[in-house]
């Protein structure tokens, strides 16, 4: 319990460091994670107008905000998600039994999911930075921000849109969450 309280205090400290104005116009998605053991961000550089990311291994906390450039002509579905690695494993097992892709809910673009899966087969360093490098090298996604994280618990929002992807994968011995979005930089 004490470690959870310390992680929450760390998350509050990281939140204070955030400078994105998520109340400005646009479609914003936020993530918060505690129990972080590894993380990396890349793609587009952080900018308070459209992409904020802050993480600290000492406090085991991470927060991010992204303003997404929506690709669908219809209003996207935005849902809250809370999950732990144990929940991810259970979802993957159920999806495998049902013959479903467990990442289809958070990453609606079939081609992007296939390209991510292919890029993950080329990972040479089994950590967040190595995964991020494999994604950046193998995917041609200008204007996209990417976050790779290994966490104990995450609370996030998920857009079901072709310009957003929340993808979970077992890489090496750990589950990693990969969040990617085409940013609205206007």
Image (spheres, rainbow, N blue to C red):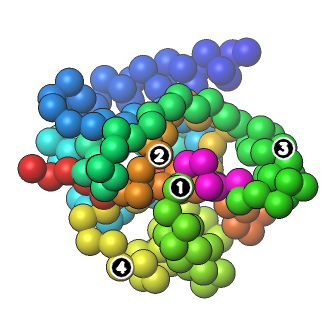
Q: Is residue 157 left or right of residue 88?
A: left
Picture coordinates of residue 79, whole percent (x, y) = 51, 31
Residue at label 1?
Answer: 107
Residue at 39% in and 34% down: 30
Q: Could you tell which of marks 1 and 4 lies nearer the N-terminus?
A: 1
Dot 3: element: helix
Residue at label 2?
Answer: 160
Q: CA distance from mark 1 to mark 4?
A: 17 Å
Q: CA distance from mark 2 to mark 1?
A: 7 Å
Query: Circles 4 and 2: CB distance less than 8 Å?
Result: no
Residue at 80% in and 40% down: 86
Q: Could you tell which of marks 3 and 4 lies nearer the N-terminus?
A: 3
Q: CA distance from mark 1 to mark 3?
A: 18 Å
Q: CA distance from mark 3 to mark 4?
A: 32 Å
**For residue 30, above or below residue 138:** above
Q: CA distance from mark 3 to mark 2?
A: 21 Å
Q: Nearer the viewer, residue 179 or 100?
A: 100
Magenta segment main secondary structure? loop
Can you tell which mark lies on residue 90? 3
Q: Quadrant of the N terminus?
A: top right
Q: Could you tell which of marks 2 and 1 lies nearer the N-terminus?
A: 1
Q: Nearer the viewer, residue 174 or 10?
A: 174
Magenta residues?
102-106
Q: Which quadrant would residue 182 be assigned to in this image?
A: bottom left
Q: Could you tell which of marks 4 and 2 lies nearer the N-terminus?
A: 4
């Amino acid at each position: 319990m004490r470690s959870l309280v310390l992680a929450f205090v760390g998350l509050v400290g990281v939140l204070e460091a955030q400078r994105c104005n998520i109340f400005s116009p646009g479609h914003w998605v936020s993530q918060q994670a505690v129990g972080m053991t590894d993380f990396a961000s890349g793609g587009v550089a952080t900018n308070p107008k459209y992409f904020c990311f802050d993480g600290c291994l000492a406090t085991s906390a991470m927060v991010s905000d992204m303003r997404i450039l929506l690709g669908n002509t219809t209003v996207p579905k935005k849902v809250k998600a809370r999950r732990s690695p144990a929940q991810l494993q259970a979802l993957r097992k159920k999806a495998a039994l049902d013959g479903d892709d467990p990442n289809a809910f958070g990453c609606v673009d079939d081609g992007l999911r296939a390209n991510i899966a292919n890029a993950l087969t080329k990972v040479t360093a089994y950590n967040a930075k190595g995964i991020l490098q494999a994604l950046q090298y193998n995917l041609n996604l200008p204007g996209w921000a990417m976050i790779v994280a290994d966490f104990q618990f995450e609370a996030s929002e998920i857009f079901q849109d072709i310009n957003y992807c929340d993808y979970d994968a077992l890489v090496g011995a750990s589950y990693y969450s990969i969040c990617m979005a085409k940013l609205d930089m206007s």
